[in-house]
Image (tube, rainbow, N blue to C red):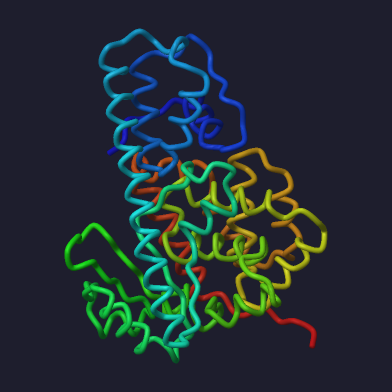
Amino acid sequence: MLPELSPAQEKLLINLADPEAPAEWGKELSASGLTAMLANAEFHGVLPIVLRKFRERGDADLPKDAALLQKLDELRDQATTATGQSMLLQYHGDRIMKALAAKGIPARIVKGPVFARKLYRQAADRPFTDIDILVDPASIDEANRTIAECGFELASGEAESRELQEFKWLEKENSSLLIELHGNLVHDTGMRRRLSLGFRELQAIDNGETDTPAALLTIGIVHAAGGHKFHRLQLCVDVLQGVRALKSPEEESRLLEAARMTGIELELATVLNVTGCLFGAPRAIALADRIEPDLSIRLAKWLITGNMLLRVNSRERLRSRLSRDVFRWVQRLARPRPHAA
């Protein structure tokens, strides 16, 4: 269980987790408070951003506490290692993509390295622990054979992987290197009757381009609400950066059309609402409000709050887990929204 944060410390964590917000904190912060905040930042996947801001501001304003400074040194070393791991994963991802291309298998890398490169001004703010490759479901078997030929072995059960359309591969010589092959980024079979995000849908959203802001934000929304149920603050930071990448009303309209096409209006309204509330981003809330709310959206917004997300692993973790589990059932039971032809 994570150390508990006061409301002021939670506010500071959110400020430091925002890649584009200035690093602001007062000298009244205690060593124990900062240590607790660092533990929360690490759990929520935003520690690289926090450490960068500490480095930019300098350690002069930090409490002169030996244990805190030692912990900071350890975390900085870990962050350097994580950056190296991301680079190694990128190498293997590129190697597999070349092998897939040589066989004429259309594929694209999604999430981690693409988010880091496209959504963050400093790629090191967004390390990743695996490489996600998306292919058309018809190409799954050939893509799996290709990954095996690249020196990886299947680490997930084949029957379950086929049901989820998600295959996990580990490098034979280094089991810390994980490749996930997807036929669809929506893995829950109960949800997939209403929403779907596969290779062809992303092609349609990109409309001849590659990794457009609308496509990246759609992926981020599905990742937050469809895959991990808001278990880390990093998921909302990806979405926050995705909203910032929308540079025109036309790109906003493309996002809303993507939501309609893929069936993720419920997820879009929920994720953008909680992200906007957490980070004080009125544009995200305004985009969420452009989806006309029905009962499922109203219930989802009530369930998924900033406090629920921040306290995933706190004393209130059972309440947070209950809210997120109920939200999953709302997703499964929600009906496709009618649209005019």
Q: Quadrant of the N terminus?
A: top left
Q: Quadrant of the C terminus?
A: bottom right
For the point 33% across and 18% down, the residue is 32
Residue 315 visible from this viewpoint: no
Judge whether 335 appears above or below 47 on screen: below
Residue 8 visible from this viewpoint: yes
For the point 63% across and 67% down, the residue is 215
What percent of the width, then of the height, locates residue 91?
Answer: 37, 60
Judge whether 117 appears above or below 339 on screen: above
For the point 18% across and 68% down, the residue is 172
Left or right side of 327 for 145? left
What percent of the width, then of the height, locates residue 295?
Answer: 64, 67
Judge whether 49 appears above or below 212 on screen: above
What percent of the width, then of the height, locates residue 85?
Answer: 32, 50
Left or right side of 18 for 162? left
What percent of the width, then of the height, locates residue 270?
Answer: 60, 58
Left or right side of 103 for 203? right
Based on the displayed image, in which of its 4 quarters is residue 178 positioned?
Answer: bottom left
The mark tally for this picture is 0
- Residue 156 versus residue 51: which sits nearer the camera? 51
Instruction: Name the residue at the left extreme.
Output: 173
Instruction: Name the residue at the right extreme.
Output: 249
Judge whether 317 appears above or below 204 on screen: above
For the point 65% across and 69% down, the residue is 265
